[in-house]
Image (cartoon, rainbow, N blue to C red):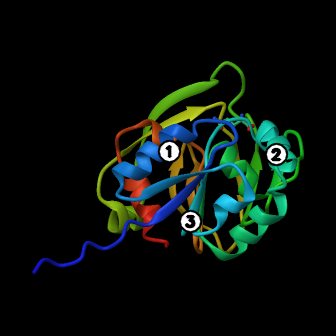
Amino acid sequence: MSAMPSPRKKVGVLALQGDFEAHAKALERAGAEPVLVNRAGDLEGIDALVIPGGESTTMLKLIGETGMKEPLADFTAKKPVFGTCAGAILLAKEVTNPEQFSFGAVDLSIERNAYGRQVDSRVATIEPGEEFAKRAGEGGVEAVFIRAPIIRRTGPGVRVLAEYAGDPVLVEQGKHLIATFHPELTSDPRIHRLFLTKI
Ligand code: GLN
Protein backbone atom coordinates (compact mmCIF):
# COMPACT_ATOMS: atom_id res chain seq x y z
CA MET A 1 0.00 0.00 0.00
CA SER A 2 1.42 3.38 -0.89
CA ALA A 3 0.81 6.54 1.09
CA MET A 4 -1.56 9.06 -0.45
CA PRO A 5 0.45 11.98 -1.88
CA SER A 6 -0.50 15.19 -0.06
CA PRO A 7 -2.56 17.39 -2.39
CA ARG A 8 -0.69 20.30 -3.94
CA LYS A 9 -1.69 23.71 -2.62
CA LYS A 10 -3.72 25.73 -5.10
CA VAL A 11 -2.22 29.17 -5.50
CA GLY A 12 -3.86 31.80 -7.68
CA VAL A 13 -1.88 34.25 -9.77
CA LEU A 14 -3.66 37.48 -10.65
CA ALA A 15 -3.51 37.30 -14.44
CA LEU A 16 -4.85 40.64 -15.65
CA GLN A 17 -1.51 42.13 -16.69
CA GLY A 18 2.20 41.69 -16.02
CA ASP A 19 4.42 38.65 -15.65
CA PHE A 20 1.88 36.21 -14.25
CA GLU A 21 3.09 33.32 -16.46
CA ALA A 22 6.54 33.44 -14.86
CA HIS A 23 4.94 33.27 -11.40
CA ALA A 24 2.80 30.30 -12.43
CA LYS A 25 5.96 28.47 -13.51
CA ALA A 26 7.79 29.46 -10.32
CA LEU A 27 4.90 28.16 -8.21
CA GLU A 28 5.01 24.88 -10.07
CA ARG A 29 8.75 24.61 -9.43
CA ALA A 30 8.07 25.27 -5.74
CA GLY A 31 5.54 22.41 -5.64
CA ALA A 32 2.19 24.22 -5.82
CA GLU A 33 -0.63 24.10 -8.36
CA PRO A 34 -0.95 27.52 -10.02
CA VAL A 35 -4.39 28.84 -10.96
CA LEU A 36 -4.70 31.90 -13.21
CA VAL A 37 -7.17 34.41 -11.75
CA ASN A 38 -8.89 36.93 -13.97
CA ARG A 39 -12.35 37.17 -12.53
CA ALA A 40 -13.79 37.18 -9.01
CA GLY A 41 -15.08 33.59 -9.23
CA ASP A 42 -11.53 32.32 -9.74
CA LEU A 43 -10.72 33.32 -6.15
CA GLU A 44 -12.98 30.58 -4.85
CA GLY A 45 -11.14 27.42 -3.95
CA ILE A 46 -7.63 28.81 -3.96
CA ASP A 47 -5.47 28.74 -0.81
CA ALA A 48 -3.38 31.84 -1.52
CA LEU A 49 -2.76 34.44 -4.23
CA VAL A 50 0.22 36.02 -5.97
CA ILE A 51 -0.08 39.55 -7.35
CA PRO A 52 2.70 39.81 -9.95
CA GLY A 53 4.86 42.61 -11.22
CA GLY A 54 3.71 44.73 -14.11
CA GLU A 55 2.20 48.20 -14.03
CA SER A 56 0.20 48.85 -10.89
CA THR A 57 -1.93 51.60 -12.48
CA THR A 58 -2.96 49.33 -15.36
CA MET A 59 -3.64 46.48 -12.96
CA LEU A 60 -5.82 48.72 -10.81
CA LYS A 61 -7.80 49.81 -13.85
CA LEU A 62 -8.39 46.19 -14.85
CA ILE A 63 -9.26 45.20 -11.28
CA GLY A 64 -11.95 47.89 -11.36
CA GLU A 65 -13.25 46.87 -14.78
CA THR A 66 -13.51 43.20 -13.85
CA GLY A 67 -15.31 43.94 -10.58
CA MET A 68 -12.54 42.41 -8.50
CA LYS A 69 -11.82 45.26 -6.09
CA GLU A 70 -14.14 44.04 -3.31
CA PRO A 71 -13.41 40.34 -3.81
CA LEU A 72 -9.66 40.99 -3.69
CA ALA A 73 -10.03 43.12 -0.56
CA ASP A 74 -11.99 40.28 1.08
CA PHE A 75 -9.41 37.72 -0.05
CA THR A 76 -6.45 39.67 1.37
CA ALA A 77 -8.26 39.91 4.71
CA LYS A 78 -8.52 36.12 4.93
CA LYS A 79 -5.78 34.35 3.00
CA PRO A 80 -2.06 34.75 2.26
CA VAL A 81 -1.11 37.06 -0.58
CA PHE A 82 2.36 37.52 -2.08
CA GLY A 83 2.90 40.81 -3.89
CA THR A 84 5.95 41.34 -6.08
CA CYS A 85 6.90 44.78 -7.40
CA ALA A 86 3.63 46.18 -8.81
CA GLY A 87 1.91 43.60 -6.58
CA ALA A 88 3.79 45.00 -3.60
CA ILE A 89 2.51 48.45 -4.50
CA LEU A 90 -1.07 47.15 -4.62
CA LEU A 91 -0.78 45.54 -1.16
CA ALA A 92 0.87 48.49 0.62
CA LYS A 93 -0.92 50.71 3.08
CA GLU A 94 0.39 53.89 1.46
CA VAL A 95 1.64 54.57 -2.08
CA THR A 96 3.56 57.65 -3.20
CA ASN A 97 4.95 59.02 -6.49
CA PRO A 98 2.05 59.49 -7.11
CA GLU A 99 -0.51 58.50 -4.49
CA GLN A 100 -2.92 55.84 -5.66
CA PHE A 101 -5.42 53.32 -4.31
CA SER A 102 -4.02 50.22 -2.63
CA PHE A 103 -5.45 47.36 -0.58
CA GLY A 104 -3.56 48.27 2.60
CA ALA A 105 -2.92 44.65 3.56
CA VAL A 106 0.65 45.32 4.71
CA ASP A 107 1.59 48.25 6.93
CA LEU A 108 4.17 49.96 4.78
CA SER A 109 4.65 53.03 2.67
CA ILE A 110 6.06 52.45 -0.79
CA GLU A 111 7.38 54.86 -3.40
CA ARG A 112 6.86 53.86 -7.02
CA ASN A 113 9.70 53.94 -9.57
CA ALA A 114 11.98 55.04 -6.80
CA TYR A 115 15.39 54.12 -8.24
CA GLY A 116 15.06 56.74 -10.97
CA ARG A 117 15.32 56.52 -14.72
CA GLN A 118 19.07 55.88 -15.15
CA VAL A 119 18.90 52.72 -13.09
CA ASP A 120 15.59 51.43 -14.38
CA SER A 121 16.53 47.81 -13.92
CA ARG A 122 19.33 45.90 -12.25
CA VAL A 123 20.27 42.50 -10.93
CA ALA A 124 21.88 42.38 -7.50
CA THR A 125 22.85 39.62 -5.11
CA ILE A 126 21.28 40.33 -1.77
CA GLU A 127 22.13 38.65 1.52
CA PRO A 128 18.94 37.98 3.48
CA GLY A 129 19.10 37.88 7.26
CA GLU A 130 19.14 34.91 9.63
CA GLU A 131 15.37 34.60 9.76
CA PHE A 132 15.26 33.95 6.01
CA ALA A 133 18.16 31.49 6.19
CA LYS A 134 16.41 29.57 8.95
CA ARG A 135 13.07 29.34 7.17
CA ALA A 136 14.01 29.34 3.48
CA GLY A 137 17.64 28.24 3.29
CA GLU A 138 21.13 29.68 3.43
CA GLY A 139 22.88 31.78 0.84
CA GLY A 140 22.45 34.92 -1.25
CA VAL A 141 19.45 35.66 -3.44
CA GLU A 142 19.70 37.00 -6.96
CA ALA A 143 17.27 39.90 -7.03
CA VAL A 144 16.00 41.33 -10.31
CA PHE A 145 14.71 44.90 -9.95
CA ILE A 146 12.62 46.38 -12.80
CA ARG A 147 11.39 49.95 -12.36
CA ALA A 148 11.15 48.90 -8.77
CA PRO A 149 9.55 50.74 -5.88
CA ILE A 150 11.32 51.41 -2.57
CA ILE A 151 9.73 50.68 0.79
CA ARG A 152 10.11 53.94 2.74
CA ARG A 153 8.39 52.97 6.00
CA THR A 154 7.46 49.70 7.67
CA GLY A 155 4.99 49.47 10.52
CA PRO A 156 5.68 47.66 13.80
CA GLY A 157 3.96 44.46 12.60
CA VAL A 158 6.20 44.15 9.56
CA ARG A 159 9.30 41.93 9.61
CA VAL A 160 12.15 42.71 7.21
CA LEU A 161 13.63 39.52 5.74
CA ALA A 162 16.09 41.10 3.31
CA GLU A 163 17.48 44.51 2.44
CA TYR A 164 19.25 45.97 -0.55
CA ALA A 165 21.32 49.17 -0.25
CA GLY A 166 19.82 49.79 3.17
CA ASP A 167 16.17 49.51 2.12
CA PRO A 168 13.83 46.60 2.87
CA VAL A 169 13.16 44.54 -0.28
CA LEU A 170 11.59 41.37 1.14
CA VAL A 171 9.19 41.76 4.06
CA GLU A 172 6.30 39.94 5.66
CA GLN A 173 3.37 40.80 7.84
CA GLY A 174 1.56 37.78 9.20
CA LYS A 175 0.33 35.74 6.26
CA HIS A 176 1.41 38.22 3.59
CA LEU A 177 4.75 38.44 1.79
CA ILE A 178 6.13 41.38 -0.21
CA ALA A 179 9.11 41.61 -2.56
CA THR A 180 10.07 44.76 -4.44
CA PHE A 181 12.03 42.58 -6.88
CA HIS A 182 11.09 39.64 -9.13
CA PRO A 183 11.81 36.22 -7.57
CA GLU A 184 9.81 34.59 -10.39
CA LEU A 185 12.49 35.56 -12.92
CA THR A 186 15.23 33.40 -11.45
CA SER A 187 15.29 29.64 -10.97
CA ASP A 188 15.70 29.91 -7.16
CA PRO A 189 12.52 28.43 -5.62
CA ARG A 190 13.21 29.51 -2.01
CA ILE A 191 11.04 32.63 -1.90
CA HIS A 192 7.99 30.95 -3.46
CA ARG A 193 8.51 28.01 -1.10
CA LEU A 194 8.65 30.38 1.85
CA PHE A 195 5.32 31.83 0.70
CA LEU A 196 3.80 28.34 0.50
CA THR A 197 4.65 27.79 4.18
CA LYS A 198 2.16 30.57 5.00
CA ILE A 199 -0.79 28.53 3.73
N1 GLN B 1 6.89 50.60 -11.95
C1 GLN B 1 5.79 49.69 -11.78
C2 GLN B 1 4.64 50.35 -11.02
O1 GLN B 1 4.80 51.40 -10.51
C3 GLN B 1 6.21 48.42 -11.09
C4 GLN B 1 7.29 47.72 -11.88
C5 GLN B 1 7.26 46.24 -11.84
O2 GLN B 1 6.29 45.61 -11.37
N2 GLN B 1 8.28 45.61 -12.37
O3 GLN B 1 3.58 49.82 -10.94
Badge 2 density bin: few <14, some 14–19, many ≥20, Cα 10 Å: many
Q: Which of 120 and 167 is in front in this view?
A: 120
Q: How far apart are marks 1 and 2 (CA)?
A: 19 Å
Q: Please, what secondary structure does the residue beneath circle 2 have?
A: helix
- Check disc 1 and report the residue beneath it: 23
Residue 141 seen from this side: yes
Residue name at image x 29 percent, y 57 percent = 138
Q: Which mark is residue 39?
A: none
Residue name at image x 31 percent, y 74 percent = 6
Q: Is ligand 1 within 8 Å of the beta carbon of the residue shown at mark 2?
A: no
Marked residue nearer the N-terminal end (1 or 3): 1
- Check disc 3 and report the residue beneath it: 48
Please state which amino acid type lies under the numbered disc 3: Ala
Q: Residue furthest left?
A: 1
- Check disc 2 and report the residue beneath it: 60
In this rendering, would 143 be left or right of 151?
left
Q: Which of 31 and 87 is in front in this view?
A: 31
